[in-house]
C-alpha cells in the first residue's frame, strides 16, 4: 500500500534510498530528499507490505500527462518483481490517466511492468 511521506518517516526513507548506489553519500542523500520535500509535484511514497512494514520507497515527478518514476528502492530481502510491480500498479492507479515513465535506471522496470498489463 502506498503511504504518503511524512517527516516522521525521514529515517526510514533515508535508509531505503541509501540502497541506491549514487545515494550512499549522506550529503547527496540529504540534498536529494530535500529536493522532493520542497516541491508539490515531486512526491515521495513509502510502500507498506501486508505485514504492515515499510519496505520500499518511490520518488516521483508529476507532469501534466505523465508520472516520472525517478527513484525506486526496496529493502534487499523485499526487492522482488512482485513488490515492485505492486508498487507501480498502485502508482498507476493513483495517477489514473497519466502515463508512467522512468529514468534510465527505472525505465526497464516500468517496461517489464507494462508488459504484465498487456497479458
Image (cartoon, rainbow, N blue to C red):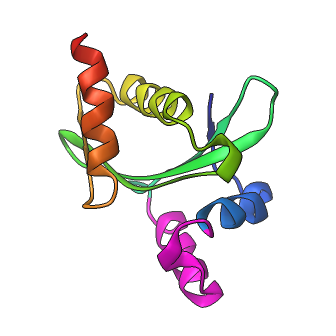
The residue shown at (55%, 74%) is 34
Q: Position of residue 119 (x, y in %)?
A: 25, 10
In this image, 96 relative to 49: left or right?
left
Report the residue that reaches farthest toward the left: 65
The residue shown at (61%, 65%) is 19
Task: Work out whether residue 62 can be spotted.
Answer: no
Query: Total number of numbered labels?
Result: 0
The residue shown at (77%, 65%) is 11
Residue 110's image quarter? top left
Residue 92's image quarter? top left
Q: Position of residue 23 (x, y in %)?
A: 54, 77
In this image, 76 relative to 37: left or right?
right
Q: Position of residue 50 (x, y in %)?
A: 74, 23
Please check the rendered image and state whether residue 23 is part of the magenta-colored stretch, yes or no. yes
The residue shown at (40%, 22%) is 93
Looking at the rendering, in which quadrant would you find the N terminus? top right
Report the residue that reaches farthest toward the top: 119
From the viewer's perspective, is residue 49 above or below residue 45?
A: above
From the viewer's perspective, is residue 48 above or below residue 117?
A: below
What segment carries the magenta color? 18-39
From the viewer's perspective, is residue 78 above or below residue 41?
A: above
Task: Work out whether residue 10 can be spotted.
Answer: yes
From the viewer's perspective, is residue 6 above or below residue 64?
A: below
Secondary structure mainly formed by the magenta segment: helix
Amino acid at each position: 500500500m502506498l503511504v504518503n511521506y511524512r517527516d516522521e518517516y525521514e529515517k526510514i526513507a533515508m535508509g531505503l534510498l541509501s540502497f541506491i548506489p549514487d545515494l550512499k553519500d549522506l550529503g547527496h542523500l540529504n540534498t536529494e530528499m530535500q529536493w522532493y520535500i520542497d516541491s508539490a509535484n515531486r512526491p515521495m511514497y513509502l510502500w507498506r507490505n501486508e505485514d504492515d512494514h515499510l519496505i520500499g520507497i518511490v520518488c516521483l515527478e508529476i507532469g501534466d500527462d505523465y508520472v516520472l518514476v525517478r527513484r525506486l528502492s526496496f529493502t534487499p530481502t523485499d526487492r522482488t518483481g512482485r513488490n515492485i510491480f505492486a508498487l507501480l500498479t498502485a502508482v498507476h492507479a493513483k495517477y489514473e490517466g497519466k502515463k508512467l515513465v522512468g529514468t534510465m535506471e527505472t525505465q526497464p522496470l516500468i517496461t517489464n511492468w507494462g508488459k504484465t498489463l498487456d497479458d
